[in-house]
Amino acid sequence: MPCTIEAATFLDQWRTLAGSMPQQLALALPVTADVEVALAALRCTTVAVRLVAGTAMQAIYAACQPAAGPEVLFELKYTPHTAPLQLTVKSERAGMAALVADALSKRFAA
């Protein structure tokens, strides 16, 4: 079952959880609607999408629920069809940044 999280809950958790250092991934993502479909296929829920002020970048905030353990929150910042993207992951569980980066790399690799 995919993760379900309200925007307000996501924001509260985002503010309180320690996060990974932003990672640069050599991936060029498609337009936002296609990214949201791909994230849903990974059983992730898109919580919010916004333009990054002063740039052509998109920011997608999403959450996944691993089979065991707490939710994993993440932010993707990217310019459609342009590498790299920036990934920031927040979770109560250590080591989740590498797992999310790996899943995204497999899903979006050319």
Image: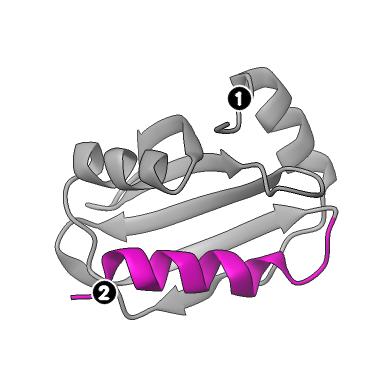
Q: Amino acid at mark 2?
A: Ala
- At which x and y percent is residue 36? 32, 39
- Total numbered labels: 2
Instruction: Say which quadrant the C terminus sits in.
Output: bottom left
User: Does residue 85 appear in this view?
Assistant: no
**Which residue is painted at 67% across and 30% down in the image?**
10
Q: Which residues are magenta?
A: 93-110
Q: Residues within 10 Å of mark 1 (few under 14, many from 20)?
A: some
Q: Residue at x 75, y 72 (%)?
A: 95
- Up the image or down, 85 lies above or below 76; here it is below
Nearest to N terminus: mark 2 or mark 1 = 1
- Mark 2: few/some/many CA within 10 Å (<14, 14-19, 20+): few
On the picture, is 110 further left or further right than 67?
A: left
Residue 109's mark?
Answer: 2
What residue lies at 42% left-to-right and 64% top-to-bottom?
A: 104
Q: Position of residue 76 (x, y in %)?
A: 44, 54
Q: Secondary structure at mark 1?
A: loop
Decide whether the magenta segment is chiefly helix, strand or loop: helix
Residue 109: x %, y % from top left: 26, 74
Q: Is residue 82 above or below residue 91?
A: below
> Amino acid under label 1?
Thr
Of residues 71 and 41, the one drawn nearer to the viewer in this rendering: 41
Q: Secondary structure at mark 2?
A: loop
Q: In the rendered view, tell whether residue 12 sits above or below residue 87.
A: above
Circle 1 residue: 4
**Is-magenta flag for residue 36?**
no
